[in-house]
Image (cartoon, rainbow, N blue to C red):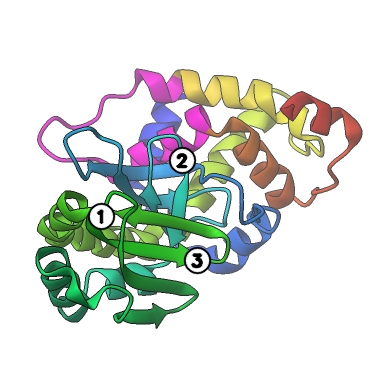
Amino acid sequence: MLMFLSSLFQSVTLWTEDAECTRAMRRLIAPPQDPPKWVLEKCWDLNASRSKQIIVGFDMSRMMDIMILLGTPSGLGVKLSVLEVHHLLSTKLRDVVLEHVEHPKCAGNSHTKAGAAEYLCTVLRSGEPGLRVSKGEEYVVLGKVTCQMLYFMAPAILQRVAFLDVVGLDGAKWIVRYLEAARTEAATLGNAHLTREKDVLPVMTALTGALGAMKLSPTALDVEKEMFSDMVFRHKDLFARMYVDYVGGGARDDDSADDRA
């Protein structure tokens, strides 16, 4: 199995990845209020107390979209799209916000929108100037120091967004390879056509055992293997759901639903 996975990651076989990934991920649509299921995420603390942070990564529960969460370590905050974070970190808004936190005479007068998000210069209850970012019922208020750190970190944050965008070009191909690896292992175990998510778990146990024995290169980040590791170790229920849909099942029966609880 280890040799198969090693050759799997070196394969250059062409696939019809997009259609196959769409089929596999068709049930990965989380409600808006649900927290992201992160893959390849990176987090930046935005103040010394670590009460505010920004996380950038793929959200496996939302068809592997790039997700940006601006909020608290508990997960409260605003989920932003790529468009919305680009507006937040734009030079134009940065200049307005930094001027406001130094000279808060324009509180409430600077109000912009991008996508479904709204950005408002405001004054906190403490009297400190800040920025309110809202989207529907979600919102977060950033104080002066947090705003300054956010804009200091902006180049790194946007670099990570661009990196994930590039990874996404190959991501569909990689996901198909993960699912084909699972199908090969299932056939080895005599269960090539699994239709219930709970029955996929023994297959994943074999996969994760082999994956855990593989070594990442110490000189360069092996993004594909790291992405696979995140998906199968951290979100095994979602991977099982993808596998069932990929091989043509997709009926979520009561037993599989109970096993995910």
Residue 106 horizontal/vertical position (percent): 22, 77
Kindly identify the amino acid type of the residue bearing the numbered disc 3: Lys
User: Residue at position x 21%, y 45% from top?
Assistant: 46
**Which residue appears farthest toward the right when viewing the image?**
254
Q: Residue at coordinates 46% horizontally, 78% vertically from top-left? A: 115
- Between disc 2 and disc 1, the foreground one is 1
Kindly identify which numbered label has been placed on residue 2.
none
Q: Nearer the viewer, residue 120 or 92?
A: 120
Q: Distance between the residues labelled 3 and 1?
A: 24 Å
Near mark 2 (Cα within 10 A), the count class, few <14, some 14-19 or many ≥20, is some
SS assignment at label 1? loop
Residue 127's disc is: 1
The answer to whether residue 13 of the structure is visible from this angle is no
> Tag 1: residue type?
Gly
User: Which dot marks residue 135?
Assistant: 3
**Residue at mark 2:** 75
What residue lies at 84% left-to-right and 42% top-to-bottom? 252
The amino acid marked with disc number 2 is Gly
Q: Which of marks 3 and 1 is nearer the N terminus?
A: 1
Q: What residue span does the magenta drawing correspond to?
A: 210-234
* Residues packed near mark 3 inside 10 Å, few (<14), some (14 to 19) or many (20 plus): some
Which element carries disc 3, helix, strand or loop?
strand
Q: Earlier in the sequence, mark 2 or mark 1?
A: 2
* Residue located 77% across and 24% down the image: 259
Q: Where does the image place residue 68, in percent across and percent down from the top left? A: 38, 56
Q: Is label 3 in contact with label 1 (beta carbons under 8 Å)?
A: no
- Reply above or below: 162 against 185: below
